[in-house]
Image (spheres, grey):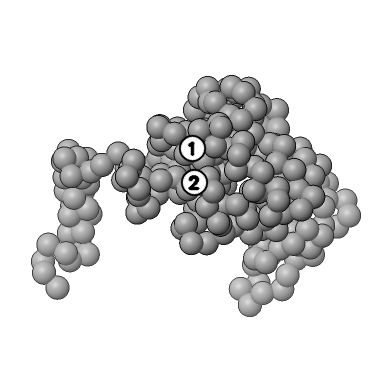
Amino acid sequence: MPRSLHASNSPLFIISLAHVLINDTSNFSASKMPGLTIGDTIPDLQVETNQGKIKLHQFCADGWTILFSHPGDFTPVCTTELGKMAQYAKEFYQRGVKLLGLSCDDVQSHNEWIKDIEAYTPGAKVNYPIIADPKREIIKQLNMVDPDEKDSTGNLPSRALHIVGPDLKIKLSFLYPATTGRNMDEVLRVIESLQKASKFKVATPANWKPGDPVVITPDVTNEQAKEMFPQGFESVELPSKKKYLRLTKV
């Protein structure tokens, strides 16, 4: 191994590389730079939708919001996704969750497209707003740009989804390629997981489904757990003999 990459020298090497990356930005485009992510507050943008102008902070305040983008109107996968989102809307609304779509076409196009969406998914009504972004400025501010998918105008929106909490911070983000449609059962599942975690000192394990046991977070002592979870909890016996995996139902 070259001496400059030896373990004892690697911290210096990494720092030097970071210095280069920070100071030499000539080869970076805006779409490649880090953007809005988990823990960030969404920008308070005023946007045009098929239901009129809205300000994001006002729309998202005091509840949960699913903000989801699409590469374009009158595209096949997007048509199926918006129909499914409309079909699941009642489930989301029952959990205090608002829906807000985004596509890089204008309001008139959105209104025409909705007819196709509702025809493809019978009984589903698209009663949530869809942001118009024909200049593709909003997708940059919301970190919803697909670096690979382009047309004659430029980069298209990615198939992105942000879940925004009542504090206006992003709690979870999905990013799918244009070729893969989103699973609404999974979106609903993670909403329930996030809401439980925000209400109780719990986390949801792998393959968790609503109704399954949850795990108590490590920062809760056993004495605290007895008070927080009077229904009881189970400490899983593990080879390490450490009692860190504790299951309960909430």
- The disc placed on residue 134 is none
In the rendered image of this protein, does residue 199 appear above or below residue 84?
A: above
Residue at 43% in and 40% down: 143
Q: Residue at 11% x, 69% y: name it.
A: 2
Residue 42 in percent (x, y) is at 52, 31
Q: Mark number for residue 105?
A: 1
Q: Quadrant of the N terminus?
A: bottom left
- Location of residue 148 (image quadrant): bottom left
In the image, taking residue 108 as reference, residue 188 lies left or right, namely: right
Q: Nearer the viewer, residue 140 or 229?
A: 140
Mark 1 touches mark 2? (CB < 8 Å): yes
> What separation in Å lies between label 1 and label 2 (alpha carbons)?
7 Å
Q: Where 180 sits versus 89, above or below?
A: below
- Mark 2 crowd level (few <14, some 14–19, many ≥20, 10 Å Cα): many
Q: Which residue is situated farthest in the left direction here?
A: 3
Question: Quick one: 180 or 247, which is closer to the camera?
Answer: 180
Which amino acid, mark 1? Asp
User: What residue does disc 2 label?
Assistant: 72
Please tell me how crowded label 1 is: few (under 14), some (14-19), or many (20+) other residues with Cα within 10 Å.
Answer: many
Left or right position of 25 against 49: left
* Residue 20 falls in image quadrant: top left
Identify the element where label 1 is drawn: loop
